[in-house]
Image (spheres, rainbow, N blue to C red):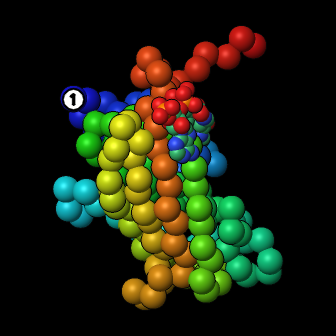
């Protein structure tokens, strides 16, 4: 089984979790293990990431939840692609809010991993997601570009 550190190399330039040297536009999130099947990260909402004035863009919120679920699998040595993402926006999140993002593995059946993730402010869940993840055939995730 690959280690978490080794799995991180598969997305070394990631817009969510690489360091600023690798990608200056990265949100530079750091996920930590909470339990065997759970990871978490903290993030303060930057005004660059608003959609409607002073509200966190829903696409960015979805990205954070997708990343939490991905890291949950990476922490278990599993590199899989998002095959399906379902997001429910309960409460707007504001610029400047400190948010906690959690990802949790729910189940695994016939190569399809089902996960859930939450984005909370002061312990109130504002955005919730479920996702299905699948390991690509042959296991190769990254691609070479022809140009
Ligand atoms: C911070 C870290 C960030 C890292 C990145 C974050 C995660 C991402 O953004 S990943 C990028 C976005 N996702 C992608 O680009 C994925 C694009 N899709 C794909 O590559 C493929 O469709 C992939 C790999 C998901 C599945 O491909 P493949 O294995 O060929 O699937 P396929 O043969 O169609 O299906 C395999 C099985 O899964 C099932 N399946 C496929 N999709 C789904 C789904 N959404 N729900 C349920 N079942 C599904 C199929 O029915 C099939 O079942 P069975 O074997 O019983 O027939």
**In the foreground, 116 or 14:** 116
Relative image position of residue 11 (x, y in whole percent): 48, 35
Ligand 1: give its quadrant: top right
Q: Is mark 1 within 8 Å of ligand 1?
A: no
Left-right relation of 16 to 116? right
Relative image position of residue 65 (x, y in whole percent): 51, 61
Residue under numbered circle 1: 1
Residue at image point 58% right, 55% down: 85
Quarter of the view holding residue 30: bottom left
Residue at image point 33% right, 47% down: 108
Name the element at disc 1.
loop
Which residue is most to the front?
110
**In the foreground, 44 or 136:** 136
Is residue 96 positioned above or below 8 on the image?
Answer: below
Is residue 77 positioned above or below 30 on the image?
Answer: above
Relative image position of residue 80 (x, y in whole percent): 44, 37
Which residue is most to the top?
146
């Amino acid at each position: 089984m690959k280690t978490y550190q080794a799995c991180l190399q598969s997305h070394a330039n990631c817009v969510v979790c690489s360091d600023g040297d690798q990608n200056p536009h990265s949100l530079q999130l750091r996920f930590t293990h909470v339990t065997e099947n759970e990871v978490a990260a903290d993030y303060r909402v930057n005004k660059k990431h608003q959609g409607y004035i002073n509200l966190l863009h829903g696409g960015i919120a979805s990205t954070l939840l997708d990343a939490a679920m991905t890291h949950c699998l990476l922490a278990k040595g599993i590199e899989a692609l998002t095959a399906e993402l379902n997001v429910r926006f309960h409460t707007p999140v504001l610029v400047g809010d400190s948010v906690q993002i959690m990802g949790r593995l729910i189940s695994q059946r016939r190569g399809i991993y089902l996960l859930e993730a939450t984005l909370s402010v002061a312990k109130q869940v504002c955005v919730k997601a479920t996702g299905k993840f699948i390991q690509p055939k042959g296991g190769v995730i990254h691609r070479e570009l022809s140009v």
